[in-house]
Image (cartoon, helix red, strand yellow):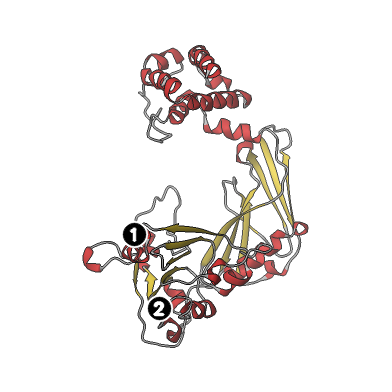
Amino acid sequence: MGFRTYTNPLWKEKFEEMIILSPFLDITTLKYFSKENTVRGEKYLFSRKEELDKIHLDILEGYNVFAFSQRVADGEDDIELSEEADEVPKSQNLHAKLFIGSKKEKKTRWYLGSANCTNAAMMRNEEFLISLDSKDKNASVKEILKILSPKAETGELQIFEKYEREIREPIKSEEFDFRKIVFSLLSYLENKKNIKAVCKPESGQTDKFNIKILLKLHKIFELKEFNISCAPYGWKRDLKLVKPKKISLNFDGMALHNLSPFFIWNIYHKKSEKSKEFITWLPIKLPENRKQAIFRSIIQNKEKFFEFIQFLLGSNEGQFEFLGKKENSKYSGGDSSVILKHNQPLFEDLLKASSRDPGKLNEIDKVINQLQNAGGDDLIPEDFKKFWKVFQEAIKVG
């Protein structure tokens, strides 16, 4: 909705009962769904506590209201994070948006997508919703209620808890709302005249590159209550602060396989000590052989090559790190014939695939061609190349 002639489908709906699950709320939209001719029966509202605190109780009285559990939102505070990864606890607050309504004909309709229960989402924004209909009892409002708010006596984790408060007037939230500043920054970045990104090889280097970002002066970078930082997605060091009077950022010495058209932005609110991070795409001309370098970085050695082949065959239950973990691994060593002698399951899996699922052989052939085009022919053992010719014939026949 919000695109050309597409309108909000929820405005046309008539439900017997309804679940609204949304991280953000406003009075206008809640009043609309409160109308009896919109939802005849019970209405269940699931949201963040800080959002519910902003709504007057007179508005919420038309709903059965549940708040997202703070135990879940702050769960990382209670677990031991890895110091090596330089991790810090992050909030796991509610982000999903979901509208579920029961229809007269014993049918349940779900709307799942990007739209919050707000006037901006319903009336102005460009949003996507997918509509799903079901007559399955397990998809009904009552069954979903059991999942979202199980009774305490069941012993299950309370993802949502009954929302209650004594003060009828709205309560000012201590959480800082980043939406306005994020919208302002995104609007600025959307204009191609405001930002330019350039990638050039480092002097005298063939595998190292420098990225430079040029930003047009703007008041958003002069706001004293915020720090705005940025870096290319593949940058392995700290993001760089955008300073009001120096709107150019240099990121030097980046490896070819780390180059990307995506950029990380971080907005830090000094008073609350909270930050908001997101990724945007910027038009930037990157070296033509970048994708090959990325592929080569994934398959770094012969062990990884075999690991990836078995990953494509589906013979390792979807894992891509089960080979070459130990020094005494049967896949270790430089002699490819040793690898093949001890790797009977791989040969058997290839034989099975040739008869049962030849499409997998096509995928492997593509990988081999990609690797060779990326200058990784040395990663493919010679013995493997010899017997792979037999399977290539099988692909042609198929």
Horizontal and vertical percent position of residue 378: 56, 19
Instruction: Answer with the quarter of the image where residue 366 lies.
Output: top right
369 sits to left or right of 86: right
> Which of the labelled discs sits on residue 63, or is there none?
2
Q: What residue is shown with label 1?
A: 137
Residue depicted at 36% across the width and 61% down the height: 75
Q: Secondary structure at mark 2?
A: loop
Q: Is residue 397 visible?
A: yes
Where 55 sits versus 133, above or below? below
| Whether residue 57 is situated above or below residue 279 in the rendered picture | below
Give amino acid for label 2.
Tyr
Q: Nearer the viewer, mark 1 or mark 2?
A: 1
Look at the numbered disc 1 and give the secondary structure of its residue: helix
Q: Using the image, determine if residue 147 lies above or below residue 207.
A: below
Q: Badge 2: how crowded within 10 Å, few (<14), some, or many (20+)?
A: some
Residue at point 44% right, 53% down? Answer: 87
- Residue 62 at what x, y percent from top left? 41, 81
Residue shown at 62%/27% (left/top)? Answer: 374
Which amino acid, by three-letter code, is at mark 1? Lys
Asked whether residue 74 is in view, the answer is no
Q: For the view shown, which residue lies furthest in the front direction?
A: 105
